[in-house]
Image: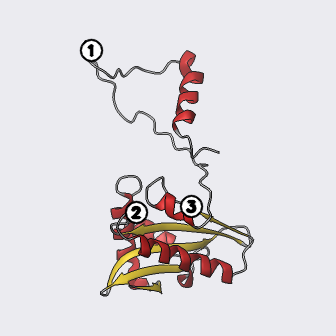
């Protein structure tokens, strides 16, 4: 296995790796990949591809943030990540080495809450903190029909229940909520 820097012919591999690793939690399109891999926040020397037998098996990128000296590690994605821990570790090491070479003030890692990536970042000293909250409106229609033997009931949330619902939501995000 080798870890190398990004080449523009890697765009399709990056798209496929992320979409396979994140499944339906985040889906990249070719247009989104082109936007992500453009200046001013992207630099090819800070984006890494892991290869085995000349095939891309993982990736991770170090992106500049708008504040000078602040970097973000994103898009850690590895084929069969549960069984490829050495590849996951090698990619994180490459990203951290690059970040350290830039003498940055702050490095943060961003990943969807997917195992084994959370544990991998923990092994490298990152502390999981959930700071992004996404809300989807009307994700499903509430069924009109009522079933007597149903173990789960779907009911529309009223304004009176809003405080309790938000408390239950936050408790459900434990232990990753800061």
Q: Quadrant of residue 124?
A: bottom right
Q: Quadrant of residue 141?
A: top left
Query: Disc 3 marks which residue?
Result: 122
Residue at coordinates 47% horizontally, 61% vertically from top-left? 117
- x and y percentages locating residue 33 in the rendered image: 44, 70
- Secondary structure category for the residue under label 3: helix
Residue 62 is situated, as x and y percent measured from the top left of the image, at 57, 74
Quadrant of the drawing holding the C terminus: top right
Choose between 101 and 63: the one closer to the eye.
101
Report which residue position mark 1 lands on.
146
Element class at badge 1? loop
Residue tagged by mark 2? 28
Q: Earlier in the sequence, mark 3 or mark 1?
A: 3
Q: Are marks 3 and 1 in contact (CB under 8 Å)?
A: no
Q: Looking at the image, is mark 2 or mark 1 nearer the viewer?
A: 1
Q: Nearer the viewer, mark 3 or mark 1?
A: 3
Q: Residue at x 39, y 36 (%)?
A: 139
Residue 15 image offset from top left, x and y in percent: 37, 69
The residue tagged with tag 2: helix, strand or loop?
Answer: loop
Of the two numbered discs 2 and 1 on the same chain, state the one appearing first in sequence: 2
């Amino acid at each position: 296995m080798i870890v190398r820097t990004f080449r523009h012919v890697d765009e399709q591999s990056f798209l496929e790796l992320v979409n396979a690793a994140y499944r339906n939690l985040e889906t990249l399109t070719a247009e989104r990949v082109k936007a992500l891999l453009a200046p001013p926040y992207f630099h090819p020397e800070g984006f890494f591809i892991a290869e085995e037998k000349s095939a891309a098996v993982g990736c991770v990128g170090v992106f500049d943030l708008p504040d000078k000296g602040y970097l973000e590690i994103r898009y850690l994605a590895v084929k069969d990540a549960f069984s490829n821990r050495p590849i996951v570790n090698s990619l994180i090491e490459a990203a951290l080495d690059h970040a350290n070479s830039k003498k940055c003030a702050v490095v943060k890692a961003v990943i969807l809450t997917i195992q084994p990536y959370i544990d991998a970042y923990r092994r490298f000293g990152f502390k999981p903190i959930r700071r992004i909250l996404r809300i989807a409106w009307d994700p499903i229609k509430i069924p009109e029909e009522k079933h007597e033997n149903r173990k789960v009931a779907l009911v529309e949330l009223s304004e009176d229940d809003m405080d309790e619902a938000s408390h239950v939501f936050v408790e459900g995000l434990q232990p990753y909520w800061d």
